[in-house]
Image (cartoon, rainbow, N blue to C red):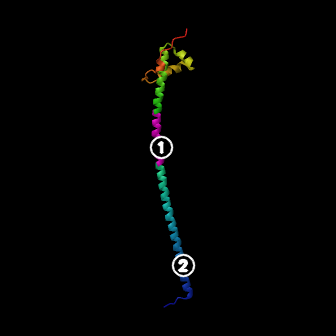
C-alpha cells in the first residue's frame, strides 16, 4: 500500500479546491446565462406586446381616416349643393353667370363649374336664397 506524502496531500487538496472553484465559476456563469435568458424573454414579451399595440393603432388610424374622409365628402357635398343652390337662385332672379362671376371675383367658368360639378341631389333652397327681395327704395 502506498502512503500519501504531505506534498501529495497538498496537491490533492489544492486540486480539489481549484476544481471546486472552477465548478462554482461555471455554475455562476450558467446562472448568469439563465438570468440573461429570462430577461431576454421578458423583453421579447414587452416588444411583441408593443408591436401588437402599434399594429392596432395603425388599424384604428386607417379606420378613423376612412371615417373622416367619408365625413369630409358628405360635408363637401352639402356645401357644394348650398353654393349651387345660391347660384341657381341668383340666376333664377335674372343675374347672368358673367355678372355673378364679376361680383364673386372669379371667372365665369368657375361659376359654371360650381353649377355643373354639384351632385344631382340638390338640397332644398335655403330661406336666405328664396326669401323675397325687399322693395326698391324710391
Residue 116 percent across, percent down from the top left: 47, 21
Instruction: Report crowding for label 2: few under 14, some 14 to 19, many 20 or more residues within 10 A (C-alpha).
Output: few
Q: Is residue 92 magenta?
A: no
For this view, does 111 lie left or right of residue 123? right
Element under disc 2: helix
Instruction: Residue 60: say if magenta.
Output: yes
Query: Is 113 situated above or below 33?
Result: above
Residue receiving disc 2: 17
Q: Residue at x 53, y 74 (%)?
A: 22
Mark linked to residue 111: none
SS category of the residue bearing label 1: helix
| Boundaries of the magenta span | 53-70
Tell me the residue at 47%/23% (across/down): 82
**Residues at circles 2 and 1 in contact by the CB criterion of under 8 Å:** no
Q: Point out residue 121 in the picture as x, y percentages from the top left corner.
A: 42, 24
Q: Earlier in the sequence, mark 2 or mark 1?
A: 2
Residue that lies at the very extreme toward the left in this rendered image: 121
Q: Is residue 73 visible?
A: yes
> Does the image show residue 115?
no
In depth, the one of 15 and 38 nearer the eye is 38
Q: Which mark is residue 58?
A: 1
Residue at the far bottom: name it.
1
**Mark 1 neighbour density, 10 Å: few (under 14) some (14–19) many (20 or more):** few
Point out the image quarter for the C terminus: top right
Where 8 sits versus 106, above or below? below
Marks counted in the figure total 2
Where is residue 81 drawn, in percent x and y?
Answer: 46, 24
What's the magenta bit mostly, secondary-structure-wise?
A: helix
Q: Nearer the viewer, residue 10 or 59?
A: 59
Front-lying residue, 4 or 83: 83
Amino acid at each position: 500500500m502506498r502512503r500519501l506524502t504531505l506534498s501529495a496531500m497538498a496537491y490533492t487538496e489544492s486540486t480539489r479546491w481549484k476544481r471546486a472553484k472552477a465548478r462554482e465559476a461555471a455554475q455562476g456563469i450558467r446562472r448568469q446565462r439563465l438570468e440573461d435568458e429570462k430577461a431576454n424573454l421578458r423583453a421579447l414579451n414587452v416588444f411583441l406586446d408593443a408591436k401588437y399595440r402599434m399594429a392596432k393603432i395603425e388599424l384604428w388610424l386607417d379606420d378613423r381616416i376612412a371615417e373622416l374622409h367619408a365625413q369630409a365628402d358628405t360635408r363637401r357635398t352639402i356645401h357644394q349643393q348650398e353654393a349651387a343652390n345660391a347660384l341657381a337662385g341668383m340666376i333664377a332672379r335674372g343675374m347672368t353667370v358673367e355678372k355673378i362671376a364679376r361680383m364673386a371675383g372669379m371667372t365665369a367658368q368657375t361659376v359654371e363649374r360650381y353649377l355643373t360639378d354639384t351632385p344631382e341631389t340638390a338640397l332644398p333652397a335655403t330661406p336666405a336664397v328664396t326669401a323675397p327681395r325687399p322693395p326698391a327704395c324710391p
